[in-house]
Image (tube, rainbow, N blue to C red):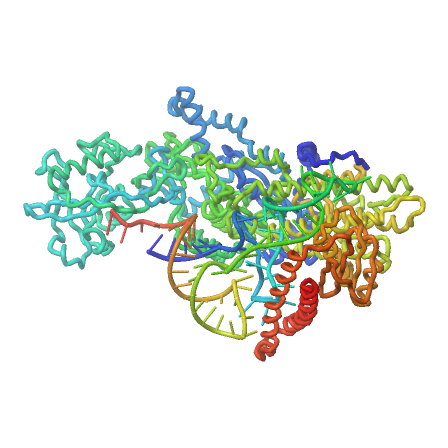
Amino acid sequence: MPHDLPKAYEPAAIEDHWAEYWVREKIFDVPTPSQAEKDRVPHPSGSSADELRQAPGTSKPQRPFTILLPPPNVTGQLHMGHMFEQAEIDILIRWRRMCGDRALWVPGTDHAGIATQMMVEKQVVLEGATRQQLGREAFVERVWKWKQHYGGAILDQMKRLGASVDWSREYFTMDDHLSVAVREAFVRLYEQGLIYRGAYIVNWCPRCQTALSDLEVIHEEQTGKIYEFSYPVAGEPGTFLNIATTRPETMLGDVAVAVHPDDERYKHLHGKFLLLPLSGTAPSAARSIPVIPDPWVSPEFGTGAVKVTPAHDPDDFALGKRHDLPSIKVLDESAHMNANAGAYAGLDRYEARARIVADLDALGLVVSIKDHTNAIGKCDRCKTVVEPLLSTQWFLAVNKTPAAGGQSLAANAIAAVEQGHIRITPDQYRKTYDEWMKNIYDWCISRQLWWGHRIPAWHCATCRQMTIARVDPTACEHCNSTALTQETDVLDTWFSSGLLPCTVFGWPPPEGESTPDLDSFYPTQLLITGFDILFFWVARMIMLGCHFMLDVPTPDGSPRTLADAVPFREVYIHALIRDANREKMSKTKGNVIDPIGIVKQYGTDAVRFTLAAMASPGTDIAFNVARTEGYRAFANKIWNAARFIFMNVERAKEADITVNLLSLAPHSSSEPKAGAPFIAHSAMSGLDQPIESRWIQSRLNQTTGEINRSLSEYRFDEAANLIYQFFWGEFCDWYLEIVKLRLDFADTADKAQTTAALTTLLTVFEASLRLLSPFMPFLTEEIWHALYDNNPPAKSIALTRYPLPGPDLINPEADREMLLLQDLISAVRAARKDLAVEEKAMVPTLIHTSASNRGLFESNADIIHKLARVSSIEFPDTLPEGSAKRSSPGFDVSVIYERTIDVAAESERLTKDLLRYEKEQLNAQRQLTNEAFLAKAPAPVVEGIRRRASELVTLLEKTQQGLDRLNT
RNA sequence: GGGCGGUUAGCUCAGUUGGUUAGAGCGCCUGCCUUACAAGCAGGAUGUCGGGGGUUCGAGUCCCUCACUGCCCACCA
């Protein structure tokens, strides 16, 4: 065993090595199971979320456990949010793998249409060219080159961070087979009548020059103006109708003014016409537009008369449809006025607005201009104000029943969650999801970009019809003409990522069949992701997954129901990472914490542990490096505990004592994943073991049970705190200090005792490493290999079994006795402080206690001597005056020293105690004399308060005596 | 305009179905380089659980209300 470890833990020295090792040795690859394996292993279909979420040891072995990595953008750099998300996934995957489950984590990247195109376009511009000059083909070629070079950044960083993914399954959303699948999905949806093309109002980004889905528009409250203008009534000089608008520049596209049919103010105008100001070269040449009644208009808002511009507003568009009005487009794709705007043609929308308002003012048609706040839509990518624009686009009908029957996409998606086939955690997001899905509009899936999956539609120049095809057609399917040109639009990025749970496992299978991977891994068990992509991605995966997988038979050949068509059984929404001041991290604010920088400074394990410990669900996380510093110290603590243990193993060897860990925690060689899930018993039988040995094993077992339970509930914070507290607060602070007494390697020593102690020490430490391993994979891997002298029973600690509690090792008696010893030792230490005894000095102590406690203290005198630095222990009937005395319900203890106590300080302390006890006693008495309490409170609670009350009597008495003594 | 969170020690946060003395880490104070660890050890101080009201034998926990704060959704010109 190497024990030349450096004194301080240096993560940089070991992490690269293990990161490379895990990838090179394919430690985390999960091949497609053979038929024989498939028969042995339960299929994911048929299992419920509840079954899959059970803690280990309560379910059948080799449960499937598959997680898809939310694919980062190819353009992305790893940020703290990624690292947090991946740490959570990795902890769970490592845990479930060690529980013996078939744990698969599939990695990949997303082509991220707009983001990537923008990035490469910027480069091209820097080189003095434009995308248009390059042309589509050359530009796309260029993006591919960029992707080959830089596209793997995040995945490379993941490798360095030790993410336990199956790299053999790595995908890119524009890989050939994924592209084929995307095309298949598109064609099928088209054939089912769910994809249609048409001219509608869409969100248009004038800067990106593409349509956007509703989700890609972010609304921001902004104070603008609301204008009231007068439109003259045709043929009635001097009469006007006042309308209100926030976008005067669109007025030249007005085709009507609508009023509520019941609005008395305007009833006389129904059927009359207005002269649209500024619409002709002279007022007399103005276009006339009708006044139309429509119940959609709210009489209360504005003037109760609304201008109708079907080409530039979704409501107006609908209104126009209802009343069979024309659409007049006055803004072009770059948000400049077009020829229909007459004199204003060529102006930017805001210049035009100013000019139009000024010109109307000159005509005396401006009634008022007031401040007005409303939410304005901006492009998610570039923050340009979005222009609602009439445009021909492709849509996915989400509320429509497919031609061949079945449920609409949204109906399936709603049912999947409502019927519990998908569980959403935390529960509050279930409602959010439900609301969204129930109010969803058709999804605009076409983008006017070059980078992405090109829509498989061909326009015929001869008959003007479209051919939609799985393979590129050579002739029009309607007129057989060869004058075909492919649709230039590409698909929304989320269309392809929405298919991922199916496509990464080989979808589409041949008609009526499945694929081996779909059989083995679909549905996946869990999706861990952020709230921000709940609608973008999660909802789309549910819609598309449920839709397409219903047609794929289950492994036993039976038809698939919604329960097994879902893409995942459960969604866990994690918190958002913010900076230490709770600010959202953003590049523009400059408060982005680069995880790699922090990792280099503190080590991956410390950063992971920080993220895990702070990962309480439901609230945002303020990332604070102070915490990471603390957990680096924890890593160092583990490191030094290992050094201590190695040192003793070495000493044992010299004294001819060896402990064979392999025989204690048997790992059979034939089954690489086998291990010792239950914590091994120490060599000696329970009763013969010294207190610290029985106690530490009891605590290890309890902690183990609690950690397993916490992880099964995704309480990473609880699990992390449990292991931290156990390892540092119990194993290191108490057990290691006590075990030093037993590790006597002198010739005269009791060899059996030393061997037993060393055995317990090694088994508990080894189990602790396995417990820690999902949280701190690097450190534990390093130490674990060293513990086995670099000849470990498995290729990685990650392939051993996670500890499970052995119930017979939980020992309440040992827990109680140890607690009493700890209390006594702490009391002596405190008393020493009262007397300002030098740290090194050994002092005599006197203890007043019950006979049974006396027995415990006497038989463990060696522990008390060492940990409390006591020279002698006596048990007199009464304790002498003037000494530093500490009391607890179980004992009083005095320390004898030449120095006297600080009377004032002691008096203050005792008075404080007295007040506290009195208050508490008052409370207890009140409850115990309350009939209602005694009648209604559960017995254990009453019993507990009774016990405490009697303790309080003793404590009060002792404290009062102490005070009396001080004051005499 | 709708909906959802948060408010607990100086800071960052835990606190299970209401139940005995509200916890942790960091920071702070005091003393120690006690041969695993000064990235450490030991001891210590610190809270009207946002305000008010209610339910209950009992409220940090449940209900109402107010305040502050964060987020999401939304086609009102």
Q: Answer left or right for A932 relative to A255.
A: right
Q: Residue at x 44, y 45 (%)?
A: A189
Q: Identify the image quadrant of residue A29.
A: top right
Q: In which quarter of the image is the C terminus of chain A?
A: bottom right
- Locate residue A482, reporting x and y percent: 38, 30
Q: Answer left or right for A572 relative to A842.
A: left
- Locate residue A278, reporting x and y percent: 14, 37
Count up the numbered dots.
0
> Does residue A960 appear in this view?
yes
Q: Residue at x 24, y 47 (%)?
A: A320
- Locate residue A22, reporting x and y percent: 68, 36
> Does residue A807 appear in this view?
no
Residue A704, placed above or below residue A486: below
Q: Identify the image quadrant of residue A282.
A: top left
Towards the viewer: A552 or A396: A396
Q: Residue at x 58, y 76 (%)?
A: A933
- Locate residue B42, reporting x and y percent: 71, 50
Q: Answer left or right for A372 relative to A644.
A: left
Q: Quadrant of the N terminus of chain A?
A: top right
Towards the viewer: A196 or A95: A95
Q: Identify the image quadrant of residue A166.
A: top right
The extreme right residue here reads A748
Towards the viewer: A197 or A310: A310
The extreme front residue here reads A968
Towards the viewer: A839 or A607: A839
The extreme top residue here reads A128
